[in-house]
Image (cartoon, rainbow, N blue to C red):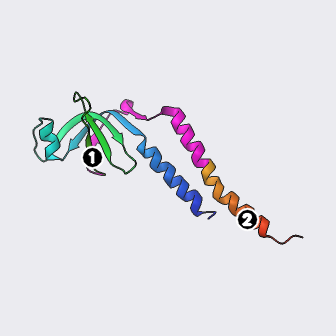
Amino acid sequence: MAVAWPLLVVWGGIQVAKSLQVYEKAQVMVLDKEACVALQLPFDDGCRVEGRLEANLDHSWWLQPNGTGSVFIRLPPGAFPFSYSPDDYRITGGKPAVIALVGVTVVLALFGPFFSWRGRKMSAPAK
């Protein structure tokens, strides 16, 4: 538990951090013909859509095309190449969310070794 728990917590923290990614102006290659037709874009093995891209915890993405209001396209994991400007990248919640995520991850990661150490200390014979 002293090793497995911290690794599991760090893995979970990385997954949550990935799901907080947002690209405000990304250009995405959409391979779903129905989505391209619904957006009235020509489909030739895909269509190029510009819009806001948000990551999800299940490694999929939501794409909100520019000028479509509340229309979202769900992109499956690994289903796209996309381009963006580094200025358009951000984390949902900004620096406070990143600091909170790192803090919670560190505290939770230390629980396993602490309780493992405490258990060994309590079960050790008294001298």
* Quarter placement of the C terminus: bottom right
Query: Residue tagged by mark 1?
Result: 75
Quarter-of-image position of residue 103:
top right
On-image quarter of the N terminus: bottom right
Which residue bears the numbered disc 2?
119
| Point 74% across, 61% down: residue | 118
Residue 78, percent across and down? 29, 51
Q: Residue at image x 21%, y 42%?
A: 29
Looking at the image, which residue is at 46% across and 44% down? 17
The tag earlier along the polypeptide, 1 or 2, is 1
- Vertical arrangement, residue 64 with respect to residue 44, above or below: above
Identify residue type, mark 1: Leu
Tell whether position 91 is magenta: yes
Rate crowding at label 1 as few (under 14), some (14 to 19) or many (20 or more) other CA atoms within 10 Å.
Answer: many
Magenta stretch: give its range: 78-106
Alpha carbon distance from label 1 to label 2: 46 Å
Would you place residue 79 above or below residue 125 in this image?
A: above
Q: Quick check: 119 left or right of 106?
A: right
Give the residue type at disc 2: Gly
